[in-house]
Image (cartoon, coloured by chain):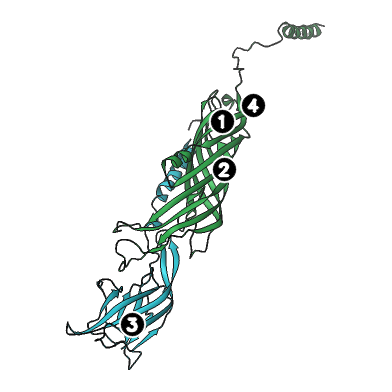
Amino acid sequence: MKKISAIITVLLCIVYFSACEKDDICVDGDTPLLVVGFYDITDTSETKEVTGMQVRGLIIGEDTLEVIENAALDSIAIPLRPTENTTSFLISQILSDPVDTLTNILTLTYQVQDKFVSRACGFVANYNALEATAARGSETDSLWIQDIDVLIPFVENSTEAHVKIFH
Amino acid sequence: MSKYSISLYLYALTWGVLWSQDKPIDLQPKDTLVYEQPYGMRVGIDLSRPVVSFLQDNFTGFEIVGDYRLTQTLYLAAELGNENKTIIEELGGEMVPNNAELYDFTASGSYIKLGVDYNTYDNWYGMNNSIFMGGRLAFSSFSQTVNSFRYYESNRYWIRDQFALGSQEEREFSGLSASWLEFVFGTKVELFANIYLGASVRLGFLLSNAEPDPDEFRNLFIPGFNKVTENSKFGVGYNYSISYLIPLYRKAKKPKEDESTSPEVEE
C-alpha cells in the first residue's frame, strides 16, 4: 500500500506540474521589422544622420498614421504589412519645422512567407524578394533619397540593416 | 515370547484405532467453501468522452476499453478510440491585449493502446474490485488542419486591435503518426453483477512523433496522447469507463501459504 501511495504522489506531481506550461508565453519568435540604415552618398560606408527624421506609415487614401518611434537618426526599424505585398512610408527630413520639411515616399515590395514558430507564438511573417523604391512626397518636395541598396532581400530577423538609403 | 506378544499387541492396537475411525477428528475445521473468481473478458466504453463531446463544441470522441483476465492479478488490456479536437490558441502571458487570437487548428484521428494491467488489490471474500497499475504501447494515426491563423507581431503599427490575418484557408497535414508508452494507474469497481465502473489516469512518454515540416506546423495535439508540450515527451490523460464482464470460466484463488507457519518477527 505504501508503494501505491508513493506512485500516486509521483503521478499527481507530474500532472500538477505539467499544467504549468513554459510554452504558454511566446518568446521564440516575432514578425521581423525591416531595418533601414541611412548612409552618406559621398562615402557609402559611413552612416549619415537624417536631420529631424520622421517616419510614418502610408496607406494611400487614408489618414496619415502616427510617427514610428526611432532610436537613432541614422537607422530605423519599420514594420511591413504582412497582409499586402507592398508597404509605403513617408520619410521626412525636417530641416526647420514646419517650414523646411522634405518628405519622400519609400515603397517596399515583397512576398510574404509565413512560418510556424511554436505553440505559443503561432505563425509569423517573413518577407522575401524585397525591393525598394523612393519617390517625392509631393510636387514641391525634392528627392533627397539619392540611392537605395537592398542588402538582404530575405527579411527573417531584425538584427542588421536590410536596406541602405544613401543621401 | 513376552517381547513378541507385546509388539503384536501394539500392532493390533494401532490397527484397531485406524479401523474404528477412518478420519482423524479435526477440532479446528477449515472453511471449505472456496470462492471461485470469475475469469473472462471485460468490454466497455469511456464515459468522459461522450460527455465532453456533448458539453463542448470543440471536441468529439469515443473510446472502447477492454481487458482479458489472465491470472489472479494480471490482465491483458486495450483501448481503442477516436478523437477530434479543435483548439483556438491565443497569445499567453501578462499584458496581452483583448483579442489576441493566434491560430485555430483541428486534430483528428484514431488510436490504439495495448498492454497489461496488474491488480494490486487483495479482494475480500466475494469481491472483484481492482486497483491496478499498468503499461501500454500506444499508436495514433491522425491529421491536423490549420483552420485559420494570424501573424504574431509584437509591433502592432498597422492593425491595432488584433493580429493581421494570415489565412483562412484550411491547411491540412495528413498522414501524421505517433507512438508512445503509457503508464496507467486506475481502479475498477464492481457496481452490480458483472458491471464495472472504472477510472484511470495516464502518463504518456512519446517514442516517435512524425511531424509536418516544423516551419509549417507541428504536432500540438495527438489523439489519445493529448497535448504535446514543447521540449517535453510527456503527456497526460484519463478515462472513466463502464464495462461489462463476459464471464468465461471461474477459478479459485490459489491459497496463500499458511501465515501461522512463518510468523513475522516484530522489530
Q: Is residue A36 above or below residue B125?
A: below
Residue at 42 percent of width and 45 percent of height? B57
In the image, B6: left or right of B197? right
Colour green, chain: B
Q: Which mark is residue B251?
A: 4
Instruction: Report whether mark 4 lies on the same chain as mark 3.
Output: no
Q: Which residue is mark 3?
A: A37
Please report whichever mark, 4 or 1, sits nearer to the chain's N-terminal start: 1
What's the colour of chain A in the image? cyan
Tags 1 and 3 touching, CB below 8 Å:
no
* Depth check, front residue: B186 or B91: B91
* Depth check, front residue: B226 or A60: A60
Instruction: Report whether mark 2 lies on the same chain as mark 4.
Output: yes
Residue B252 pos. (x, y %): 63, 25
**Label 3 amino acid?**
Gly
At label 3, counting other C-alpha atoms closer than 10 Å, the crowd grade (few under 14, some 14-19, many 20 or more) is many
Residue A135 pos. (x, y %): 32, 84
- Element type at marker 3? strand
Disc 2/disc 4 C-alpha distance (Å): 29 Å
Disc 3/disc 2 C-alpha distance (Å): 60 Å
Q: Which residue is mark 2?
A: B80
